[in-house]
Image (tube, coloured by chain):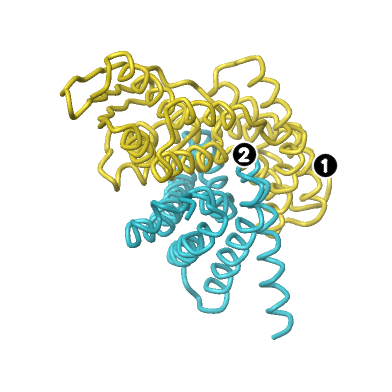
């Protein structure tokens, strides 16, 4: 039987663990399975209810029938596949090796403080990726070069605005506008400028919320799935607004 | 024959570069990068081949390629101890129908500027629906194709990160 104090500590940890996973862009059923593994390793059962902003965690001790319920806010974190991988592996390790709560907490703290890929490296890789994408759409080499530079400019603006904590949707519009405006410089030369313009904001495509939304809906978490898809659609609309602003300025050159 | 092979390989190589770069934005573990590149290259090269040599439409070809990526991430995920989504989401990104999405936005803008010339406006509206339908169908089928293996092999898909 667990003392109430221990049960409260487990509830707090599972709440923080689950909200961190959701904030880092993990789909709902994985968060649920991971939380259940952690709970099982501690000899308790857990029920979770989600929205996109909050998580309700209910942890019960089957021996005493005592239950503790807490509402925890989901932090806004950048998407991280590494957190997804590491924290999923931690849940299996806790279950398979019977780790104590203190050991799990200690490893959790180490994993969530791991540094991300350096922002300059991400900027360079994303720019190269978009240039390769331009080539895939049959863009010529000059367009690829312009797309590389446009993406770098757009990405730098995005990183700066994220650092200043500007609203996410405004950041996407400004980034798409900057990238497409820079790509519009291709109209000055004889090259596949339309392809350069089309490709320039595509690094903003919200692949993770789109696919997570579809997985959630197919696994029965319809409300969370729809919320994720609405979020993805809003980002797509913001990309379209940024691109549309550039196209409105240069439409006569593109006809 | 050699020219076709070179074109397919180039297509795969470019897709691999694109997938690694787009993937980097979402901070995957470093050990996942070679697998993301391989899956993206195979998937995109398959879609290119289906569209250009078997005359299959972009939506069906994307679905087939996404399924290959999904099954590939099931096979490769265990070795890297990565969840399937970590491998297949970045691998799908080079197949996003960018030019169709761009044409949808452009047609919509031109439609708004052609309100005084209804005939031209109808033409732009038609182009908007055509391009938007292709874009949405391809995106939906990409997600569905890659997710299918998760539901077919649930147990394996759910224990990728388990250390045995």
Secondary structure of the residue carrying numbered label 1: helix
Q: Which mark is residue A144?
A: none
Residue A51 visible to the viewer: yes
Q: Which residue is mark 2?
A: B27
Which of the pair A152/A85 is nearer the observer? A85
Quadrant for residue B22, please give it.
top right
- Please tell me how crowded label 1 is: few (under 14), some (14-19), or many (20+) other residues with Cα within 10 Å: few
Q: Residue furthest bottom?
A: B1
Q: Residue furthest front?
A: A1
Question: Which chain corresponds to the colour yellow?
Answer: A
- Residue A240 screen position, x and y as percent: 54, 35
Q: Which residue is mark 1?
A: A188
| Subunit bearing disc 2 | B
Query: Which dot, 1 or 2, sits closer to the camera?
Result: 2
Q: Tell me the quarter of the image containing the N terminus of chain B.
A: bottom right
Which of the pair B34/B1 is nearer the observer? B34
| Subunit bearing disc 1 | A
Question: Which chain corresponds to the colour cyan?
Answer: B
Q: Relative to A149, say whether B123 is above or below.
A: below
- Residue A217 screen position, x and y as percent: 30, 43
Residue A233 visible to the viewer: no
B95 sits to left or right of A75: right
Which residue corresponds to the image point at 71% horizontal and 38% vertical from the top-left?
A122
B48 sits to left or right of A90: right
Which residue corresponds to the image point at 36% horizontal and 46% vertical from the top-left?
A215
- Residue B106 screen position, x and y as percent: 56, 41
- Residue B164 screen position, x and y as percent: 47, 55
Secondary structure of the residue carrying numbered label 2: loop
B146 sits to left or right of B2: left
Which residue corresponds to the image point at 44% horizontal and 57% vertical from the top-left?
B146
Query: How far apart are labels 1 and 2 at the CA level?
Result: 36 Å
């Amino acid at each position: 039987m667990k003392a109430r104090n221990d049960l409260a500590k487990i509830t707090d940890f599972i709440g923080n663990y689950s909200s961190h996973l959701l904030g880092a862009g993990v789909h709902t059923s994985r968060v649920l399975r991971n939380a259940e593994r952690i709970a099982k390793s501690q000899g308790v059962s857990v029920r979770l209810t989600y929205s996109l902003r909050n998580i309700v965690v209910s942890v019960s001790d089957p021996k005493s029938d005592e239950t503790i319920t807490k509402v925890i806010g989901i932090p806004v974190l950048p998407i991280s596949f590494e957190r997804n991988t590491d924290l999923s592996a931690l849940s299996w390790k806790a279950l398979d090796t019977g780790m104590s709560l203190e050991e799990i907490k200690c490893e959790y703290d180490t994993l969530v403080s791991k540094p991300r890929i350096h922002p300059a490296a991400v900027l360079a890789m994303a720019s190269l990726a978009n240039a390769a994408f331009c080539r895939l759409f049959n863009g010529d080499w000059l367009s690829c070069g312009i797309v590389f530079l446009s993406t770098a400019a757009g990405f730098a603006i995005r990183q700066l605005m994220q650092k200043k904590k500007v609203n996410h949707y405004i950041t996407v519009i400004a980034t798409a506008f900057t990238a497409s405006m820079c790509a519009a410089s291709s109209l000055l030369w004889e090259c596949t400028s339309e392809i350069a313009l089309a490709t320039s904001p595509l690094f903003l495509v919200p692949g993770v919320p789109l696919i997570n939304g579809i997985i959630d809906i197919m696994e029965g978490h319809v409300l969370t799935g729809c919320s994720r898809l609405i979020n993805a659609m809003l980002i797509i609309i913001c990309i379209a607004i940024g691109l549309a602003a550039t196209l409105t300025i240069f439409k006569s050159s593109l006809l | 024959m050699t020219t076709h092979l070179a074109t397919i390989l180039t297509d795969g190589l470019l897709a691999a570069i694109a997938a690694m770069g787009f993937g980097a934005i979402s901070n995957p573990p470093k050990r996942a990068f070679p697998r993301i590149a391989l899956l993206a290259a195979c998937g995109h090269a398959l879609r290119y081949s289906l569209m250009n040599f078997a005359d299959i439409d972009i939506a069906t070809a994307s679905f087939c390629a996404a399924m290959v990526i999904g099954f590939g991430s099931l096979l490769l995920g265990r070795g890297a101890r990565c969840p399937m989504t970590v491998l297949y989401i970045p691998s799908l990104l080079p197949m996003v129908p960018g030019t169709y999405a761009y044409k949808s936005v452009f047609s919509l803008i031109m439609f708004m500027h052609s309100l005084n010339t209804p005939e031209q406006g109808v033409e732009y509206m038609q182009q908007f629906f055509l391009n938007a339908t292709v874009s949405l169908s391809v995106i939906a089928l990409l997600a569905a194709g890659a997710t299918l293996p998760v539901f077919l092999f649930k147990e394996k898909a759910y224990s990728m990160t388990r250390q045995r």
